Amino acid sequence: MELDNHTILTESRLSSDHTPLSINIPIFEEIIQSLKFTIPPKSDQELAFIKDIISNLKSLDTSNINNSEKLEQLVSQLGSIVEQS
């Protein structure tokens, strides 16, 4: 359906110089699918996830961050760790 569908109702004008404007706005029912991944608290999956994160964080080399380029690389690695986990 066209979004810019309007009509000027000149025959409905009264004594003023204003004319009513009618606009049709289509509204559709839309179902938005959403999905959330959860890990049950205190489960084996949660423990494995935490161990994986800790192990990967320990592997990050933070000893020589002396410029913004090295900092950006480290932040990128951190993002990859979280994304992969």
Image: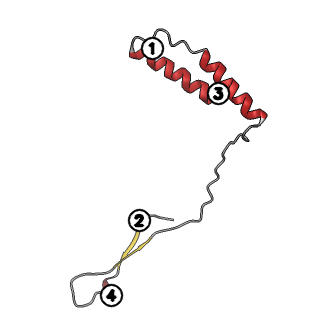
User: Are circles 2 and 1 on residues that touch, CB within 8 Å?
Assistant: no
Relative horizontal placement of residue 73, taking residue 33 as reference (left or right): left
State the CA–CA distance, disc 4 to disc 2: 21 Å
Give the vertical position of 57 relative to 19 (above or below).
above
Callout 1 crowding tier (Cα within 10 Å): few <14, some 14–19, many ≥20 = few
Instruction: Mark 3 or mark 1: name the one nearer the start of the chain.
Output: 1
Q: Residue at x 60, y 24 (%)?
A: 81
- Residue position for label 3: 84
How many callouts does the rendering have?
A: 4
Instruction: Mark 2 or mark 1: name the one nearer the start of the chain.
Output: 2
Callout 3 crowding tier (Cα within 10 Å): few <14, some 14–19, many ≥20 = few
State the CA–CA distance, disc 4 to disc 1: 70 Å
Residue 37: give x, y in percent of width and height. 68, 42
Instruction: Mark 3 or mark 2: name the one nearer the start of the chain.
Output: 2
- Residue position for label 1: 70
Residue type for callout 1:
Lys
Relative horizontal placement of residue 41, taking residue 72 as reference (left or right): right
State the CA–CA distance, disc 3 to disc 1: 21 Å
Residue type for callout 2:
Asp
State the CA–CA distance, disc 2 to disc 1: 51 Å
Q: Residue at x 66, y 28 (%)?
A: 85
Residue 19: give x, y in percent of width and height. 28, 81
- Residue position for label 4: 12
- In front: label 3 or label 4: 3
Q: Under tag 2, what secondary structure?
A: loop
- Residue position for label 2: 4
Residue 72: give x, y in percent of width and height. 45, 20
Q: Residue at x 55, y 23 (%)?
A: 78
Residue type for callout 3:
Gln
Give the vertical position of 42 relative to 72 (above or below).
below
Instruction: Mark 3 or mark 4: name the one nearer the start of the chain.
Output: 4
